[in-house]
Amino acid sequence: MLQCTKELLKEQYGISENAMKIINRAEQEIASAFNGIDQIRQYNQIKVLAAFKRCKVEQRHFLPSTGYGYDDNGRDTLDKLYAEVFNCQSAIVSPMIASGTHAIYLALTALLRPGDTLLFAGGKPYDTLEPIIGLTPSSGSLEEWGISYKQTEIACDGTLDIEQIKEALSDTKCRAVLLQRSKGYAWRPSLSINDIKAAVKEIRQVSPETVILVDNCYGEFCYTQEPTDAGVDIIIGSLIKNPGGGIAPTGAYIAGKEELITQVAHRLTAPGIGREVGSYAAWYLPFFQGLFLAPHVAAEALKGAVLCSKVFEALGYDVLPSAECPRTDIIQAVKFGNSEALISFIKAIQRSAPVDSHVVPEPWNMPGYQDPVIMAAGTFIQGASIELSADAPIRPPYIAYMQGGLTYDHVKFALMLTAQGIM
Ligand SMILES: *Cc1c(COP(=O)(O)O)cnc(C)c1O
């Protein structure tokens, strides 16, 4: 670091030489992981550019529409672009889908019918899915609609338990299997594309008619392939995470097989209307530009996550994944063991933010979550977790999940603040 950087850090934020030293030392030890991330970023950037070229993206596609939005070229081209990037037949990308949770609910309610069974393969699903399924009673849950739910547990080594999945599928004919690529708020490895590929092969053998969906939240552009490349039928993700590149203001996507995406479209708007309507009176530019930037931004976030892992490992905490482990999502988990260190970590992340850096986050009962949650999100786009953010349910063993970072330098600086607060 330049001498003037050190002085600025000391002067503006009171960061000690020692905290700087710890972070800089950790950074020197992860050069090869960074090189791997650069290689993936390069591939994905070209993949995205080639999709823009195939879709002949033009200035006019950025323009807004109003009313019904018939013949909205921006909307239709954006859909096509996502389908090209994700190497699948069709996609719906929409600012009308409020979040990743909404998109998952939309897809499940579009594809399942009363009497069907949904299998969640891989432990407890992400917290916000519990009310959707009906695990916590909620109006409009799948349970209310007469859709049953089954789940298989994670195997001892933290991966998918294929035998259990096969058994569950041979028992009942499940209409749909949902896999979650990212660990979410769980202490397990996230699923790699190879894990997903292997599961798809086995599921197809025992139950070829079952629709395989992947919750792809946080996974986009972390690897050269996506779950659609591994043969799944549908992937779902949020635009205020990776594929929005920190630029998309809202929305989510659902991508996959044409026939299934058409079903989803009829649920998104209305049967018989499908994707013919849907206007957006703000313009589409940020969705296109965000997707263009997404491979780069995901790589910045990945580097930040790797550095976080190395730093907290050096400080004596359990981390998941380790700095050297190949990544399949942008989440870094750190196990603090006590709520004080956990809360101090989250508060330091907030202090490093460009927005609301003066605000002190406190645990609160967030809609959709079972325990009080503390979140640091000093973001430009509200709650965006492709921007540097950290969250933690306040429950033992007090694990913080850090993710995002539009620039690596921001994450590096934030880690100095967190380390300083804990040492
Ligand atoms: C974020 C996330 C969701 C839900 O997305 P929201 O946009 O927060 O509703 C679902 N699953 C996983 C794994 C996620 O990371």
Image (spheres, helix red, strand yellow):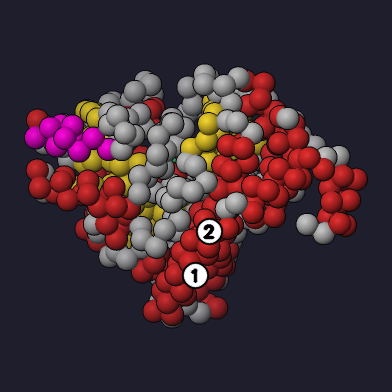
Q: Residue at x 39, y 27 (%)?
A: 131
Compare residues 313 and 140 and report the one nearer the observer.
313
Q: Quadrant of residue 210?
A: top left
Q: Residues within 10 Å of mark 1 (few under 14, many from 20)?
A: some
Residue 262's place in the image compared with 369, above or below, is below
Give the x, y percent position of residue 72: 44, 68
Compare residues 14 and 322 and report the one nearer the observer.
322
Nearer to us: label 2 or label 1: 2
Residue 138's place in the image compared with 120, above or below, is above
Q: Residues within 10 Å of mark 2 (few under 14, many from 20)?
A: few
Residue 165's place in the image compared with 243, above or below, is above
Give the x, y percent position of residue 212: 23, 47
Which region is colored magenta? 160-170
Q: Residue at x 9, y 30 (%)?
A: 171
Q: Residue at x 63, y 41 (%)?
A: 311
Residue 411 visible to the viewer: no
Compare residues 91 and 180 and report the one nearer the observer.
180
* Type of amino acid at the residue the image marks with label 2: Ser
Q: Quadrant of residue 130?
A: top left
Q: Which mark is residue 32?
A: 2
Residue 289's place in the image compared with 353, above or below, is below
State the residue position of label 1: 42
Q: Is most of the magenta stretch helix, strand or loop?
A: helix
Query: Element type at marker 2?
Result: helix
Give the x, y percent position of residue 400: 57, 32
